[in-house]
Amino acid sequence: MYAVASLVRKWVGVDADAMWERLAAVCNLTDSRNTPAPHFSWQAASAYDLQASKKVLASISEAARSFSVQTAGIGIFTGEQPILYLALVKTTKLLELHYSIWERLQPYAIDANTRYVPELWVPHITLAHQALTRPGLECLLQRLIYQPLEFTLVVENIALLSQSDGDAGVVAEYDFQAANGKETEGR
């Protein structure tokens, strides 16, 4: 499986990684995040034409500039395997970039996940999912529900991520504007 995502490397006013590590330890979450870095996804698919997709992502990153996005508290995707996430506020800039990514990459996506189509997309940063048990979720909710979780994060890249057999990695990452869309392999 693949995803086109933005890796969140800059949080304004909060040490999000330290906060999450404390919560994971207190709530006994052993495998709560199996991704290379906190991120939010623009599109996901079973596979991509990698060569064509990398060209599209490089082109998008060359035209894009960094911008800020606010989180808006927590949410839960319910079901057999619930997902706890930080919700992102949909802004015009975020929606325009999402639409551009979706439209330009769609021809190169194989079995694109329809949850990411612009009309259905719920931008979010997953906090816990695969190892999220009922006691773990209850613990997290007890500790998070009364905390302010409105943070600012900086969107400054676009990346192609892969996941296979529980291993996740960055196939390629493109920084917006500052690095002229230069590709970084497997960061």
Image (tube, rainbow, N blue to C red):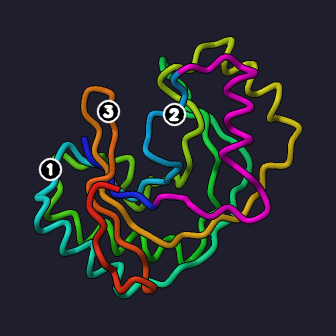
Mark 2: few/some/many CA within 10 Å (<14, 14-19, 20+) = some
Q: Position of residue 6 (x, y in %)?
A: 45, 61
* Relative height, residue 25 to residue 17 (above, below): above
Q: Which mark is residue 33?
A: 2
Q: Which of marks 1 and 3 precedes in the sequence?
A: 1
Camera-nearest residue between 82 and 40: 40
Magenta residues (range): 7-30
Q: Residues within 10 Å of mark 3 (few under 14, many from 20)?
A: few
Left or right of residue 81, residue 67 in this image:
right
Residue under numbered circle 3: 167
Q: In this rendering, is residue 86 above or below 138?
A: below
Image quadrant containing the C terminus: bottom left
Indicate the secondary structure of the residue bearing disc 3.
Answer: strand
**Label whose residue precedes the other's in the sequence (2 or 3):** 2
- Packing grade of label 1 (10 A; few <14, some 14-19, many >=20) is some
Name the residue type under label 2.
Arg
